[in-house]
Amino acid sequence: MKNNIEKVYGKLPKKKLGLKKHKVDLGVVQDIIQIFKEGQDQFTTAASMEDRALGEYENSLQTLLRAEELIVTIEVGAEDLGVEIPRETKDIFDRVYSFISSAQDKLNK
């Protein structure tokens, strides 16, 4: 007479289940999860840096707009007096306008 364990084993299929393949698949899934978490952390860091950068662009723009107000005052005053603004000074004005444009472009993306 067979004992109960032998009866149960006798009813199980004789086919191999290929558990090694399932173990490999599980390992790959764990790798994917780990890589995803790393990518997610990097994305979160980048988004935070982007938010800080946009804040800095906004601060920069506000400062540059104050400089622009002074430029307009100088240009109007020079025109009223009939005085020509030196080329070096106009170059500085152009740089201010260029930075204003760049800051606005960054903020409007």
Image (cartoon, rainbow, N blue to C red):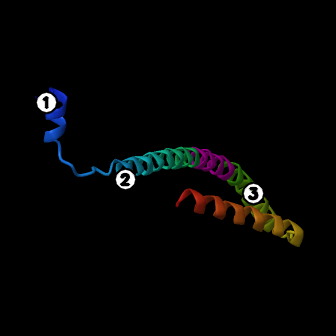
Magenta highlight: main SS = helix
Q: Relative to residue 20, is residue 44 drawn left or right?
A: right
| Residue at mark 3 | 73
Determine contact: label 3, label 1, CB under 8 Å. no
**Residue 50, percent across and down?**
58, 50
Question: Of label 3 and label 1, which has the lower sequence position?
Answer: 1
Residue 104 image offset from top left, x and y in percent: 60, 60
**Callout 1, which amino acid?**
Lys
Q: Where's the N terminus, which quadrant?
A: top left
Q: Nearer the viewer, residue 85 or 50?
A: 50
Residue at the image point whose x is 48% and y is 48% from the top? 31
Q: Is mark 1 on a helix, strand or loop?
A: loop
Q: Which residue matches tag 1?
A: 2
Q: Residues within 10 Å of mark 3 (few under 14, many from 20)?
A: few
Residue 21, which numbered label? 2
Count of numbered tags: 3
Residue 103 part of the magenta-drawn span: no
